[in-house]
Amino acid sequence: MINFFKKIRQKFITQNKFNQYLLYAIGEIILVMVGILLALQVSNWNQQRVASNKEKVLLSELHQEFIENKEQFRVVVSNHQLAFDICDKWIAMFPIDPKTVNLDSLPIRSAGLQKRWTFNPSQGIINSLVSTSSFELISNRELRKLLVSWNDVLLDFQEDELNSKKYVMEILNPFMNKYFHYKANYSDPRLDISILASAEFENLIWQRKEYLLDILSRGYELSRIQKTINRIIELSNPE
């Protein structure tokens, strides 16, 4: 092909057809430019196709990660709610008269009171996205914004959980372990169940409820993290 064009140029030159040669030269330049532009377009198309395929894979992995996180969050919140309900059951009995209270009912009311839960979602995919150049593959601007803000949203919710956990471990558990049986056996003759009538015991239950209220209803952390999880699942759906 190169030799073909070379022969044409030589023909115009030897025949002293300068105007025709000039037109031919211009046409050849345009042809070369068109070829370059087409090659660039094909290259860009291939790059976009590769990027699109990578984005679909990342979105699929992110989608699955947050579906699993949503289920873990549901379980954690349900356990917080269980502890909250137990507090309400205790409070409904106040003031407790140790002489008349049905001791057989108390172990049921105590189940879960001292347990503590924290939401610790899987973050392998989201961390690999936000901290690497792969983040640029996410084309949805809203999703990008949610991924960047996710860690702050999570920490706000976990802060209330950690405060509640600290209270259980440092205050509630030592008290319960000192005065009550580990398996909530209130009939154990070694125990002095008169502590059930004390203001100290009532205050401990009320304070436990207050910490759970911070998690479940005060502020907007729980609602915010629920909305964020649901929206990320929706926007990352590869279908």
Image (cartoon, grey):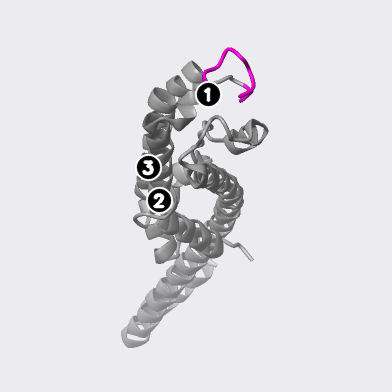
Sequence-earlier tag: 3 or 2: 2
Prevailing secondary structure of the magenta residues: loop
Q: How far separated are the C-alphas under marks 1 and 2?
A: 47 Å
The label on residue 193 is 1
Q: Quadrant of the N terminus?
A: bottom right
Which of these two is toward me, 63 or 121? 121
Dot 1 lies on which element? helix
Q: Along the polypeptide, which appears first: circle 1 or circle 2?
A: 2
Residue segment shown in magenta: 183-192
Residue most extreme to the front: 99
Q: Label 2, on which residue?
A: 150
The picture quadrant where one finds residue 200 is top left
Q: Is residue 138 magenta?
A: no
Residue drawn at point x = 49 percent, y = 19 percent: 179
Residue ID at (49%, 63%):
231
* Rendered location of residue 178, percent (x, y): 47, 16
Q: Residue at x 40, y 72 (%)?
A: 33
Q: Which badge, 3 or 1, is on the more N-terminal residue?
A: 3
The furthest residue to the bottom:
19
Relative to 13, does residue 97 appear above or below in the rendering?
above
Of residue 186 and residue 9, the one placed in the foreground of this image is 186
Q: Which residue is mark 3?
A: 160
Q: Quadrant location of residue 18?
A: bottom left
Q: Amino acid at mark 3?
A: Asp
Q: Nearer the viewer, residue 189 or 8?
A: 189
| Callout 2 amino acid | Trp
Q: Position of residue 82 (x, y in %)?
A: 57, 45
Q: Which element is circle 3 on?
A: helix
Residue 55 vs 172, above or below: the answer is: below
Between the C-alphas of marks 3 and 2, the distance is 16 Å
Circle 1 residues within 10 Å: few <14, some 14–19, many ≥20: some
- Classify 10 Å Cα crowding around label 2: few (below 14), some (14-19), many (20 and above): some
